[in-house]
Amino acid sequence: MSVISKDLTKLAKVLYKGRDTSHGIQHVSKVRDNAMLISRQLNITDSYRLIKIETAALFHDLWDHKYINPLSMEYKRAKDNFKYELKKRLFSDQEIKDIEIIIDNISLSREMELRRIDSLSSLKHLQLMRDIVSDADKLEMLGISGIERIVEFQMHKYPNTKSNELQNIVKKVYDTKISKFFDENYIKTEPGREMAKPLMQEMKNYIEIIN
């Protein structure tokens, strides 16, 4: 791991302090690892592109709407502090802007809504980087570990959720989101799709058992 990677990981540990495991440092570190693996398999070697991908992956949940109201001062502070920390690490204004654009276009819920109203637009030179980070994040929704993340988040938000309710929530997430990943091309990159196949089968097997 490079010096800048170690420094960004250290920063992420600070900025995600207090988060539950479903959207905290454990999760974003796995997303970063997935993103770098996809990048390698796509033969991306440009260091400037790779650092944008890595940074977006590590901080993609920092101002997630499930944790911070987008209309709140906390949201603005989180973004401003993020920019401040990157500037301290000699990221240019353009690099920071690109990373923020990638982060702001990763949300699966937002992607689904934009598709519904036929409002998806190309991010031009950032599109592939966005797709890599988005695929890397979606991979963490899959398999048994993905099911565990759904449960972790639900129990964090609603600690009194009963086990039969948890099963229904997992099924709902699968039916409304995850089951569409392949058929509706939500996983964009070829390496991402290959990595997703066995994990998707794990999830299908689980859903069949609880149905």
Image (spheres, rainbow, N blue to C red):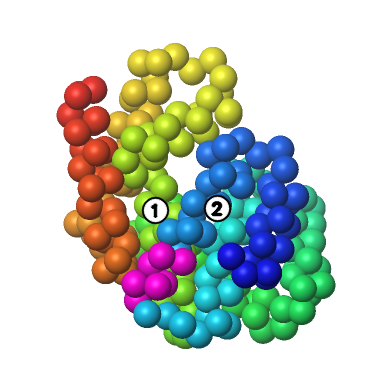
Measured along the vertical axis of the image, is residue 162 above or below residue 28?
Answer: above
Measured along the vertical axis of the image, is residue 25 above or below residue 91?
Answer: above
Tell me which amino acid carries mark 2. Ser
Label 2 crowd (10 A; few <14 / some 14-19 / many >=20): some
Q: Secondary structure at mark 1?
A: helix
- How many numbered marks have been drawn onto this rendered protein structure? 2
Q: Residue at x 59, y 65 (%)?
A: 1
Q: Which residue is mark 1?
A: 138
Q: Secondary structure at mark 2?
A: helix
Q: CA distance from mark 2 to mark 1?
A: 14 Å
Quarter where residue 92 is shown:
bottom right
Measured along the vertical axis of the image, is residue 90 above or below residue 193?
Answer: below
Q: Which residue is mark 2?
A: 29
| Magenta span contains residue 37 | yes
Quarter where residue 165 is shown:
top left
Q: Residue at x 55, y 67 (%)?
A: 54
In front of the other: 96 or 32: 32
Stretch in magenta: 36-42
- Dominant SS type (magenta): helix
Task: Answer left or right for 13 relative to 135.
Answer: right
Q: Do the CB atoms of the residues marked 2 and 1 lie less than 8 Å apart?
A: no
Label 1 crowd (10 A; few <14 / some 14-19 / many >=20): many
Q: Measured from the top left, where is residue 196 in percent x and y?
A: 28, 53
Which label sits in the foreground, 2 or 1?
Answer: 2
- Mark before the other along the chain sequence, 2 or 1: 2
Task: Answer left or right for 208 relative to 12.
Answer: left
Q: Measured from the top left, where is residue 68 in percent x and y?
A: 67, 46
Query: Is residue 107 in view from this perspective?
Result: no
Q: Measured from the top left, where is residue 206 in percent x and y?
A: 24, 30
Q: Quadrant of the C terminus?
A: top left
Please give the label number shown on residue 159: none
